[in-house]
Amino acid sequence: MDMTVVQKLARVLNVLVTITFVCNLIALLLVPGLVGIGQEGGMEAFRYLTSYENPLEVPLRLAALFFMVCWQFLWRIWRDAPGAVLTVFLWFCGICTAVILWQGRRVLGTILTGAPFRAENGVSLRRAALCCFLISAAALARVVWGLFYYRSAAPLLTYNALFVPIFLMAGLLCMVMSALFRQAAELKEENDLTI
């Protein structure tokens, strides 16, 4: 059986979503280190690589050094409030994003099988919508926390303030698509019974 254009596109999207999912999981492991590097100037450790080293050795040393620098901040990041709040926020959003990507893989899997109008797609999209709403709520909480902690309007001009409406709209879109997939599954079921 030949694949349709939609199934070919779904296969490509499935590969891209899988790659993004794996990268998301790797990034979750590095969050405390990246926050610590950004706050404490941890990039100083990379300065000591010299140019007269073996060119094949430098990427391996950079990777090893990067992981060592990241993990040294795992325990130190909890000492100051902004770093701890940012770490928890990024972990929470990263976990929600992983759930959204996994639900997207499930929907793309049903498209690849040639039967996209299933009730399970409605459930998957509803879960993705819930995660979008949770990210929006977490971003709003972080903006409110920033307003009180810094006693300034500066948090209103950050990416967190932008996350609130974007993920709220994404959640609403996923809810609409969930309802459409459930309705299509019901119509298909009725149609199959009448034949």
Image (cartoon, rainbow, N blue to C red):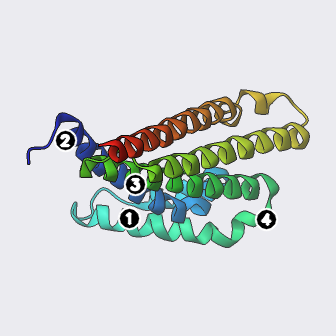
Callout 4 crowding tier (Cα within 10 Å): few <14, some 14–19, many ≥20: few
Q: Nearer the viewer, mark 3 or mark 1?
A: 3
Q: Which residue is mark 3?
A: 106
Q: Amino acid at mark 3?
A: Arg
Checking the image for residue 63, the label placed there is 1
Residue 171 on image: x %, y %: 60, 38
Mark nearer the N terminus (4 vs 2) = 2
Label 2 residue SS: helix
The answer to whether one can see residue 16 in this image is no
The answer to whether one can see residue 180 in this image is yes
Q: Which residue is mark 4?
A: 79
As measured in the structure, the alpha-carbon distance from the residue carrying label 3 to the one carrying label 2 is 16 Å
Q: Nearer the viewer, mark 2 or mark 1?
A: 2
As measured in the structure, the alpha-carbon distance from the residue carrying label 4 to the one carrying label 2 is 50 Å
Marks 3 & 2, CB-CB < 8 Å contact: no
User: What residue sits 81% from the left and 56% below the top?
Assistant: 81
Q: Is residue 52 left or right of 23 when viewed as pictured?
A: left
Callout 1 crowding tier (Cα within 10 Å): few <14, some 14–19, many ≥20: few
Q: Is residue 153 left or right of 98 when viewed as pictured?
A: right
Q: Amino acid at mark 1?
A: Ala
Q: Which residue is mark 2?
A: 8
Label 1 residue SS: helix
